[in-house]
Image: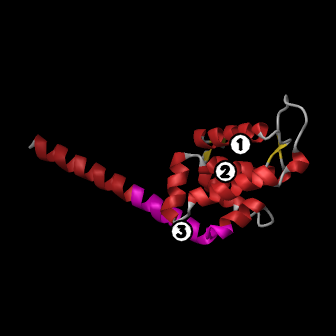
Amino acid sequence: MVEPSSALQSVFDRAVKLSKSYTHEYVTLEHMLYSMCEDEKFCNILKGYGTDVDNLKNHLITYLDNKLDGIKLKVTKFKPKKTISVERVLNRAFTQVLFSGRTNIDLTDVFLSLMSESKSWAYYYLVEAKVDKDKFMDYLHSEIEEIYEDEVDQSETKEHLTNTHQT
């Protein structure tokens, strides 16, 4: 069964809190993207790719501060709902993970799915930050390969050391 990773669950919870703090009726892609940028590990991935994360966050906060008056509520006790675009992004990420045979939806899955929402401000700010979906996927694959190679190298070194000490 496909489940959200703990990092994704934390990001979504933060996005809901962010939406509530603005008294926004909905959790938008921009709430999600800002919350993703607050995740240290994911933030480091973006920085490694070459993204100015602070600038991206500033654009998103300015957007949340000034452009969403139409979804502000007067009440303070409510649970924000996901927009259709957030649902679509999450469903697309779920489907990709399902077809890849994995069991956890991670932040990168949602991020890549978000990059398909070309009619959103989140997408616009990512393009402005020079994030290209295909290049970002290539970057992720090279990072994953590097991590895997490092793990293999470390296990081979440990195995070699163990075998050396046994003789």
Residue 58 visible in the picture: yes
Task: Give the Cα distance between marks 2 and 3.
Answer: 23 Å
Residue that appears at 70% across and 55% down: 60
Distance (Cα) linking label 3 and label 1: 27 Å
Dominant SS of magenta comes to helix
- The amino acid pointed to by label 3 is Asp
- Image quadrant occupied by the C terminus: top left
Q: Which tag, 3 or 1, sits closer to the chain's start?
A: 1
Mark 2 vs mark 3: which is more N-terminal? 2
Q: Are marks 3 and 1 in contact (CB under 8 Å)?
A: no
Q: Earlier in the sequence, mark 1 or mark 2?
A: 1
Q: Is residue 144 magenta?
A: yes
The stretch in magenta equals: 127-147
- Residue 34 — which label? 2
Position of residue 31 measured from the top left corner of the image (x, y, whole percent): 73, 48
Residue 75, percent from left and from top: 89, 32
Residue indicated by mark 1: 15
